[in-house]
Amino acid sequence: MAVPSASDVIEVSFGVTLDTQVGAIISSAKAGTHLDVRLRWSAQRPAGGVPPPAGAVT
């Protein structure tokens, strides 16, 4: 049985909503924002196709 090779690129996307509300009995104020976050990792493999050892600085 063949083992599939590891992915060369991994990407994760998610959204974050931040809201705040300040108020009293008579008045209140509300503010908010939405952030879209995308993280992407790319494998940089040497010509031989073997990944560098863990902790290696490339």
Image: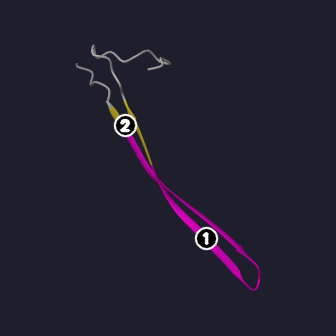
Q: Is the magenta stretch mostly helix, strand or loop?
A: strand
Residue 30 lies in quadrant: bottom right
In which quadrant will I find the N terminus?
top left
Residue 14: x percent and y percent?
Answer: 45, 51
The residue lying furthest to the right in this view is: 25
Front-most of residues 14 and 41: 41
Q: How many labels does the image show?
A: 2
In which quadrant will I find the C terminus?
top left
Report the amino acid beneath label 1.
Ala
Q: Looking at the picture, does residue 12 appear above or below residue 35?
A: above
- Mark 2 vs mark 1: which is more N-terminal? 2
Q: How crowded is mark 2: few (under 14 residues within 10 Å), some or many (20 or more)?
A: few
Residue 33: x percent and y percent?
Answer: 55, 64
Residue 32: x percent and y percent?
Answer: 58, 67
Residue beneath disc 2? 10
Magenta part of the chain: 11-37
Is residue 13 located in the magenta-colored stretch of the structure?
Answer: yes
How many angstroms separate mark 2 from mark 1 (CA)? 34 Å
Residue 51: x percent and y percent?
Answer: 36, 18
**Is 18 displayed left or right of 27 in the figure?**
left
Q: Nearer the viewer, mark 2 or mark 1?
A: 1
What element does badge 1 sit on? strand
Q: Looking at the picture, does residue 36 appear above or below residue 24?
A: above
Residue plotted at (41% across, 44% down): 12
The residue lying furthest to the bottom in this view is: 26
